[in-house]
């Protein structure tokens, strides 16, 4: 592996390592049965369907953790794009791809 991809790989590796920990939190949340399940009948068709009603929301840390994992993957893509640009003699910067500012 080329050295210019080490940071991108590290960002992906970190995110992948977090997924099992995150799954454990979801399983623990699910074990608390934070929802009520009931079977209802459709008055028009007579078919039965399962209804789940929330008895509480996710722990706010779950939303934060999902965001951090996704951000780490996006960071890996940014690093990969920058490395590929440098390999093709393009210096990535925050101004690349933007319209030049006018002097008004």
Image: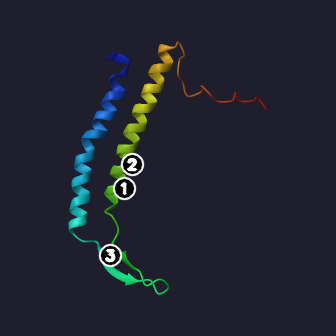
Position of 85 with respect to 8 (left or right) is: right
Q: Earlier in the sequence, mark 2 or mark 3?
A: 3
**Point 62% across, 28% down: residue:** 97
The percent coordinates of residue 57 (x first, y second) are: 35, 68
Relative to 27, residue 78 above or below: above
Dot 2 crowding, Cα within 10 Å, few <14, some 14–19, many 20+:
few
Q: Position of residue 64 (x, y in %)?
A: 36, 52
For the point 47% across and 83% down, the residue is: 45
Q: Depth check: give the residue in front, 15 or 51.
A: 51
Label 1, on which residue? Answer: 63
Q: Looking at the image, is 81 positioned above or below residue 19? A: above
From mark 1 to mark 3, how far is it between C-alphas? 17 Å
Q: Nearer the viewer, mark 1 or mark 3?
A: 3
Q: Choose top left, top right, bottom left or bottom right for residue 94.
A: top right
Determine the residue located farthest toward the right in the rendered image.
Answer: 104
Residue occupying image coordinates x 31% and y 62%: 59
Question: As drawn, is 97 to the left or to the right of 11?
Answer: right
Q: From the image, tell me which residue sits under label 3.
A: 55
Task: Identify the residue under disc 2.
Answer: 67
Residue 36, quarter of picture: bottom left
Residue drawn 39% across the image and 48% down it: 67
- In the picture, the quarter occupied by the C terminus is top right
| Vertical side of 89 occupied by 65: above or below | below
Q: Position of residue 95 (x, y in %)?
A: 60, 27
Q: CA distance from mark 2 to mark 3?
A: 24 Å
As displayed, is residue 58 above or below residue 8?
below
């Amino acid at each position: 592996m080329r050295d210019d991809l080490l940071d991108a790989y590290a960002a992906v590796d970190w995110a992948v390592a977090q997924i099992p920990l995150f799954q454990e939190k979801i399983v623990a949340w699910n074990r608390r049965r934070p929802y009520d399940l009931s079977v209802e009948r459709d008055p028009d068709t007579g078919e039965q369907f399962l209804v789940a009603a929330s008895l509480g929301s996710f722990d706010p840390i779950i939303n934060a953790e999902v965001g951090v994992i996704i951000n780490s993957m996006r960071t890996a893509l940014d690093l990969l794009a920058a490395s590929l640009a440098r390999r093709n003699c393009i210096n990535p910067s925050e101004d690349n791809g933007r319209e030049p500012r006018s002097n008004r």
